[in-house]
Amino acid sequence: MKKTLVSLAAVAALTTGAMAADKGIELKTTGQTVLYYNTLGNNAAFSTGGKSLFTSDGGAAASRANFGIQLNLDADLKNGFTLGSTINYLGTAGLEKNLVNGVMQSTDGTAGTVTGDKNIADEIYLSQLYIAKKMANTTLKIGRQELPKSLSPFAFSEGWNVFKNTFDAILAVNTDIPDTAIVGAFVADGNGNGFGHNMSSFEHLRVNNDSVSGNGGINIGGAAYMLTAQNKSIPMTTVTASYYNLIGIQAGEGKGADVLWADALVAGKDMPLGLKVGLQGGQINPRSNGLDSSTAFGLKVGMVPMESLSLCLAYSSVNDGTAAIQNVGGIKTPLYTQMIANQKAIALDSNTMMLKGVYNTGDNGKIILQGSMSDTGKKSLWKYNKGTVASPDMQGSDLLEIDLVYKVKAAGINWLAAYISQDFDKDKGTTKADHNDIIRFVARYNF
């Protein structure tokens, strides 16, 4: 796959010079700068994949970091046309010299290491470049862009990593029907997401994406066609229904799959104790012989027992079909039970319970404590135990995950500190891990 290198000086000359001077177009400049650190430790023997927190040695990356700058250049092109573009610098600020041995995201696919000399062009990629046109109550958006999970639950941009993943897509939004948004999309390729993932490479969408680098799973050989309707006519209720036609999700078959997904959320100021109730469910139906349908169901109930405290209880169930209930352009799921790092355990052949509490201290930030328990089966994507990729009938491992997160905005910077604890099954008589500790620090300044 060819990689296009973009010079910041050239982009600045093209946009600020040619556009502003010759066309009289004003640019709106926004962006963010991010410092991201993640470290993992487990209780396995070093010879079988053991890692220690805050270390930068070993074959597989135990500690990862990035320093990035994102610049958005948007413009009103007149006559209902607008331009959107996002340029990203993704580096390490030299942290790999003695603090880390991997990156959260890359621009060259070096997921495990960050060694080697680079030119400035090797660390820059274009994540968005699109033209939008508004015609009455319809907006058409063509080009490289972000897609929101609220309207595209199976092909969406994930915000958990350094920068969001994006898609080459055509998107149309119509609001002619009262209280209703109709969204249609053609989604061709995406740059994906995951630990160490190459953000400058736009490739096929994928199902059952379970690899650490985000490159595993089954290719969608064609594209994804999506139709979503979101309606708010019922008081205090938002109903969203989506249909996807995935073209070719099995090598050599090319028959694809149909995806049906619906979500209903009841919430409002008149609800007692701030009660919120959500219901979701749907199915992925492969059109190839021998591939089983995947069916999922989810329920969540939230409340605000006191002004500074909110609680949520959620449940999800996914059967043992062929395709995971998962973002085809990333690694996360649309399920209510999605936490920081449990996506592999909840996306397929799994029943999961989750309890979450958020305590808002005001200016001193938010404290989030959440836990989930997943009872997984043989087809689960969670592979820490019971076999390997070559032995799919022996996969699956129950997972208990507990997340403690602190978020605060100070000195204009959004700070995040998180501790993730994972306990899972272990094969008898082996030295494999049955516990993970993950610590994450993120500083994000929006301008």
Image: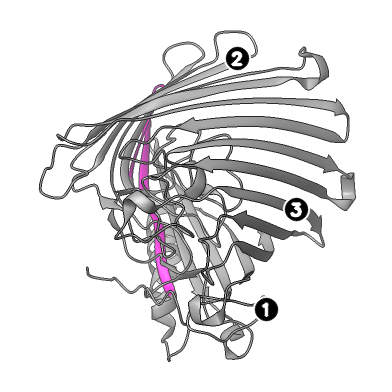
Name the image quarter holding the C terminus. Answer: bottom right
Q: Which of the two labelled residues, at mark 2 and mark 3, occupies the earlier sequence position?
A: 2
Looking at the image, tell me whether mark 1 or mark 2 is earlier in sequence order: 1
Label 2: which residue?
A: 237
**Label 3: how many Cα within 10 Å (few below 14, some 14–19, many 20+):** some
The N terminus: image quadrant: bottom left
- Residue visible at 32% across and 65% down in the picture: 201
Q: Is residue 233 left or right of residue 331?
A: right
From the image, tell me which residue sits under label 1: 54
Q: Is residue 307 left or right of residue 152?
A: right
Query: What span is in magenta?
Result: 124-142
Main SS category, magenta section: strand
Q: Mark 3 = which residue?
A: 404
Q: Residue at x 79, y 33 (%)?
A: 310
Residue most extreme to the left? 252
Q: CA distance from mark 2 to mark 3?
A: 31 Å
Q: Is residue 77 magenta?
A: no
Q: Quadrant of residue 94?
A: bottom right
Which is closer to the viewer, label 2 or label 3?
3
Q: Is residue 86 above or below residue 119?
A: above
Q: Which of these two is toward me, 250 or 432?
A: 432
Count of numbered circles on the image: 3
Q: Position of residue 329 (x, y in %)?
A: 38, 49
Q: Amino acid at mark 1?
A: Phe
C-alpha span from label 1 to label 3 = 18 Å
Q: Give the side of residue 322 with respect to residue 434, left or right.
A: left
Residue nearer the viewer, 110 or 143: 110
Residue in view at x 42 percent, y 46 percent: 380
Residue 178 shown left or right of residue 167 in the figure: right
Report the disc number at residue 382.
Answer: none
